[in-house]
Image: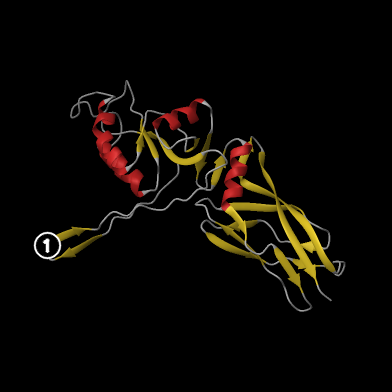
C-alpha cells in the first residue's frame, strides 16, 4: 500500500474553527496501450472489523489522495469493536457506497493490489482487470508487475525533450528528460557508446524535468550519429531479481 501523508489545515478565528475546502491530490499515471491505469487500494479496514474509522472516511481519503478504486476488506472473524459496533462485514460497503458514487470512487471488494490496467473505468473493468491479472503493485518508489505494463508506464511517463545533442568546443550539451507520472524513475545506464559518458545512477523525479549532462571523450566522431542508450529502471520490477530495461534513442551532432 502506498504511504500517504495527509495534512488537514484549519484556520482559527477566536474560538471558531473553519475547515478548508478539501482538495484532490493529482496522482498522474499514464494509460498503457489499450487500457486505463487505475490507482487502487484494496486493503482497507473500518470500525466494522479492526479498523479505527467510519467507512466514509476511507472514501474521503481516497478521493483526496488521487485514488480511483478502493475496497473495504473487513475481517470475517475478528471484530475488536464488537461492544460498540454490530458485527456485519457487509455494512461498511453499504455505508460507504453513496459517498463513493458521489465522488466518483469505484468501491469494490478486493485484494491487496495497487495498480490496475482496465479496459473501462468502472466496476466491470476492475473485475476484468483482476481476473485477467492486469495488475501491478506500487509501494513507495517501487512497482512490481508484468513487463508489458511496466514498459507502458515508462513509455507513457518519460519524454525526451532534447532528443538531439549538439556538441561544440567548450559547450556541454544537456539531455532533458521529463517524467510526467507520479512515480520517480531510478535508472542506471547499462550501455552507451565508448566515447559517451553518462553518470549514473540517475533519479528522474516525479512530475518534473531532469537535466543530464553527458561528457564525451576525444574519440567522439564528428558529424551526426544516431544511438540508443540502454537503461535499467531499477524501481520497476518485472520478476524476482529482474528490472525493466529500456532504450533511449538520441542523436548526437558533433561540430568541429
Q: Where is residue 104 in the image (x, y as percent from the top left)?
A: 33, 42
Q: Quadrant of residue 105?
A: top left
Q: Position of residue 125 (x, y in %)?
A: 45, 32
Taking the spot 39% from the left edge, 38% from the top edge, the residue there is 69
Kindly tell me whether residue 53 is visible in this rendering.
Answer: no
Q: Which quarter of the rendering shows the N terminus?
A: top left
Q: Quadrant of residue 44?
A: top left
107 on left or right of 21: right
Q: Position of residue 26 (x, y in %)?
A: 42, 53
Q: Looking at the image, which residue sits at the far bottom?
A: 170
152 on left or right of 222: left
Q: Which quarter of the rendering shows the C terminus?
A: bottom right
74 on left or right of 184: left
Kindly tell me whether residue 4 is visible in this rendering.
Answer: yes
The front one of 199 and 148 is: 148
In the rendered image, the vertical position of residue 2 relative to residue 134, given as above or below: below
The front one of 112 and 146 is: 146
Taking the spot 27% from the left edge, 59% from the top edge, the residue there is 9
Q: Where is residue 209 in the image (x, y as percent from the top left)?
A: 57, 62
What is the count of numbered marks?
1
What residue would you read off at disc 1?
15
> How is the rendered protein coloured?
secondary structure
Q: Looking at the image, which residue sits at the far top?
A: 77
In the rendered image, the vertical position of residue 97 relative to residue 220, given as above or below: above
Amino acid at each position: 500500500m502506498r504511504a500517504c501523508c495527509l495534512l488537514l489545515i484549519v484556520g482559527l478565528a477566536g474560538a471558531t474553527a473553519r475547515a478548508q475546502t478539501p482538495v484532490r491530490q493529482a496522482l498522474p499515471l499514464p494509460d498503457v496501450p489499450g487500457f486505463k491505469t487505475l490507482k487502487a487500494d484494496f486493503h482497507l479496514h473500518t470500525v466494522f472489523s479492526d479498523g479505527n474509522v467510519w467507512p466514509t472516511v476511507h472514501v474521503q481519503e481516497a478521493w483526496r489522495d488521487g485514488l480511483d478504486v478502493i475496497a473495504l476488506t473487513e475481517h470475517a472473524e475478528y471484530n475488536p469493536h464488537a461492544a460498540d459496533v454490530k458485527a456485519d462485514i457487509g455494512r461498511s460497503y453499504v455505508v460507504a457506497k453513496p459517498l463513493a458514487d458521489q465522488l466518483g470512487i469505484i468501491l469494490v471488494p478486493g485484494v491487496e493490489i495497487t495498480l490496475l490496467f482496465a479496459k473501462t473505468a468502472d466496476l466491470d473493468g476492475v473485475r476484468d482487470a483482476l481476473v485477467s491479472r492486469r495488475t501491478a503493485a506500487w509501494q513507495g518508489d517501487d512497482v512490481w508487475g508484468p513487463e508489458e505494463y511496466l514498459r507502458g508506464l515508462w513509455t507513457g511517463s518519460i519524454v525526451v525533450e532534447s532528443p538531439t545533442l549538439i556538441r561544440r568546443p567548450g559547450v556541454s550539451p544537456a539531455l532533458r528528460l521529463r517524467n510526467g507520472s507520479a512515480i520517480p524513475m531510478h535508472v542506471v545506464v547499462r550501455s552507451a557508446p565508448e566515447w559517451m559518458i553518462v553518470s549514473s545512477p540517475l533519479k528522474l523525479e516525479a512530475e518534473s524535468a531532469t537535466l543530464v549532462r553527458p561528457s564525451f571523450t576525444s574519440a567522439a566522431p564528428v558529424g551526426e550519429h544516431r544511438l540508443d542508450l540502454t537503461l535499467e529502471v531499477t524501481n520497476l520490477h518485472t520478476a524476482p531479481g529482474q528490472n525493466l530495461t529500456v532504450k533511449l534513442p538520441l542523436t548526437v551532432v558533433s561540430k568541429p
